Image (cartoon, rainbow, N blue to C red):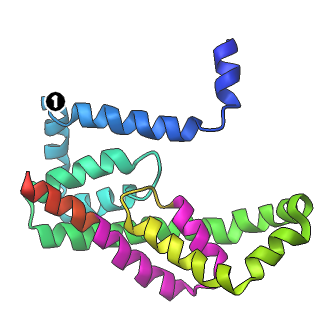
Amino acid sequence: MILFRKYKFWKFKNTLLLILSVAFLVYLIDVPAVKDAVHGLSGLGVFGIFLAGMFFVSTFTIAPAGVVLFYFAKEFDPFAVVIFAGVGAMCGDYLIFRFLKDKVFEELRPAFEKIAGSHLSKIFSTPYFAWLAPVLGAVIIASPLPDELGISLLGISKLKNWQFLLLSLGLNSLGILVIVLLAKAV
């Protein structure tokens, strides 16, 4: 019980869960039951690739989606995997983007203003932040890391929806291409 209370307030619990899930999934890659499950998903064809791409954007689903995309790259045309998984990832990112932009940022604005006051708003208003936030957000989305932080940075910036969609599609497709190339090399 004491351990649970300490875990509840531990600062890096989500990071630990991500690392443990990645380690567990690396272990499971060669398990026959996992291969059978992925093979069952491959029966969905393009829709299965699209779904794997949608799940490729979240902290808790990136590892299993990466494994599924790895296997799909061996089974399907690599170009199709990159395109359809990229479109799926773009859709997943857009759902998160709209949720963060419409709900979370508006809810947190009074808290940020109360905690940080004018200091935080001054930082967000600087020209350096105006170009650095989208660049950092784009780098995070292009990497195989979960997209939530990158989406948050892009959401704070003044990107229009169509700009976000194009950026998300291109960057996620690049990240998925790395997985596809790795799958083809192995």
Residue that lies at the very extreme toward the top in this rendered image = 1
Question: Please, what secondary structure does the residue beneath circle 1 have?
Answer: loop
- Do we see residue 43 in this rendering? no
User: Which quarter of the rendering shows the N terminus?
Assistant: top right
Residue 84: x and y, percent?
A: 25, 70
Range shown magenta: 148-175
Nearer-the-camera pick, 164 or 141 = 141
Mostly what secondary structure, the magenta segment? helix
> Relative to residue 112, is residue 172 drawn left or right?
left
Residue 146 in the magenta stretch? The answer is no
How many labels, in total? 1
Residue that lies at the very extreme toward the front in this rendered image = 128
Residue 77: x and y, percent?
A: 9, 67
Q: Residue at x 47, y 49 (%)?
A: 59
Q: Residue at x 23, y 49 (%)?
A: 68
Q: Please, is residue 130 above or below residue 72 in the view?
A: below
> Relative to residue 111, is residue 146 drawn left or right?
left
Q: Residue at x 47, y 74 (%)?
A: 138
Q: Residue at x 8, y 58 (%)?
A: 184
Residue 168 in the magenta stretch? The answer is yes
> Which image quarter: residue 39?
top left
> Which image quarter: residue 126?
bottom right
The crowd level at tag 1 (other Cα within 10 Å; few <14, some 14-19, many 20+) is few
Q: Residue under circle 1?
A: 31
Residue 57: x and y, percent?
A: 42, 59
Q: Amino acid at mark 1?
A: Val
Q: Please, is residue 41 above or below residue 96 in the view?
A: above
Residue 117: x and y, percent?
A: 90, 66
- Do we see residue 10 in this rendering? yes
Q: Please, is residue 57 above or below residue 90 in the view?
A: above
